């Protein structure tokens, strides 16, 4: 069984949703406190020296990190969770999957721990990255043409990002006002019966 090292409500939630949507069983190991010295960090550091969540240990013992890599791994056995290869939608799926982790994620890396990167002006760094994140979400809103899911009538693994990121800054009220299509997709994910247990365990519901 796959093991996920993570923290409820953190980025590991996205991988939990993906695995659950694919029907893949896993066990969850809570490493709350991994971001400061202590037992949780020591436990995670043995597997992933970068001390990031999620960190997955696959059934063959391989360590897997990065939510986009987890998505691509799952598509090998569950191809229906993305648009079909060779279609324009598949190209958009791949682009937006990588765009999400290459653009949106770093704003949290710097804003969550601004004292590490700008010890002389942590509040300014948090504010500027927050404003930039909002521009990124507004851009993503313009890329969404279909409903109820990002690529039309079929859910994809990319949809799993939205209910989790909506929980983070700038929070749900901002999404409802400024990115209604993204907000509607997040609502649709939250309504799926098979995801209720995971969403509640991660305080999304």
Image (cartoon, helix red, strand yellow):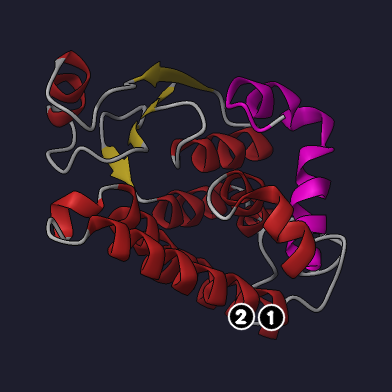
Say which element carries label 2: helix
The residue lying toward the viewer, choosing from 71 and 128, is 128
Mark 1: few, some, or many residues within 10 Å (few <14, many ≥20)? some
Horizontally, residue 187 falls left or right of residue 72, namely right
The residues bearing labels 2 and 1 have C-alpha atoms spaced at a distance of: 7 Å
x, y (%) of residue 129? 38, 67
Q: Residue at x 53, y 43 (%)?
A: 14
Residue furthest to the bottom in view is: 88
Which quadrant would the C terminus be assigned to in this image? top right
Classify residue 194 by image quadrant. top right
Above or below for 122 versus 181? above
Which segment did they paint magenta? 179-204
x, y (%) of residue 34? 24, 27
Residue 128 counted in the magenta span: no
The residue lying toward the viewer, choosing from 123 and 96, is 123
Mark 2: few, some, or many residues within 10 Å (few <14, many ≥20)? few
How many numbered circles are shown? 2
Which residue carries the number 1 mark?
A: 143
- Residue 98 seen: no
x, y (%) of residue 149? 80, 61
Horizontally, residue 194 falls left or right of residue 9, namely right
Say which element carries label 1: helix
Classify residue 142 by image quadrant. bottom right
Could you tell me if the residues under marks 2 and 1 are in contact, i.e. CB atoms within 8 Å? Answer: yes
Classify residue 12 by image quadrant. top left
x, y (%) of residue 155? 76, 55
Which residue carries the number 2 mark?
A: 139
Above or below for 73 versus 180? above
């Amino acid at each position: 069984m796959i093991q996920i090292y993570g923290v409820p409500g953190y980025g590991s939630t996205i991988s939990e949703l993906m695995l659950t949507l694919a029907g893949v069983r896993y066990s969850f190991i809570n490493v709350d406190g991994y971001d400061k010295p202590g037992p949780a960090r020591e436990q995670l550091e043995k597997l992933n020296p970068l001390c990031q969540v999620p960190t997955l240990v696959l059934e063959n013992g391989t360590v897997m990190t990065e939510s986009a890599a987890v998505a691509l791994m799952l598509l090998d056995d569950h191809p229906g969770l993305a648009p079909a290869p060779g279609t324009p939608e598949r190209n958009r799926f791949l682009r937006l999957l990588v765009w999400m982790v290459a653009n949106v994620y770093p704003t949290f890396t710097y804003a969550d721990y601004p004292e590490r990167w700008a010890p002389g002006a942590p509040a300014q760094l948090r504010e500027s990255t927050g404003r930039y994140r909002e521009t990124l979400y507004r851009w993503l809103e313009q890329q969404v043409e279909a409903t109820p899911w990002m690529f039309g009538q079929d859910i994809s693994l990319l949809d799993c990002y939205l209910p989790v990121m909506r929980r983070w800054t700038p929070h749900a009220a901002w999404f409802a006002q400024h990115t209604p299509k993204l907000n509607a997709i997040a609502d649709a994910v939250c309504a799926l019966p098979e995801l209720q247990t995971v969403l509640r365990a991660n305080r999304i519901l």
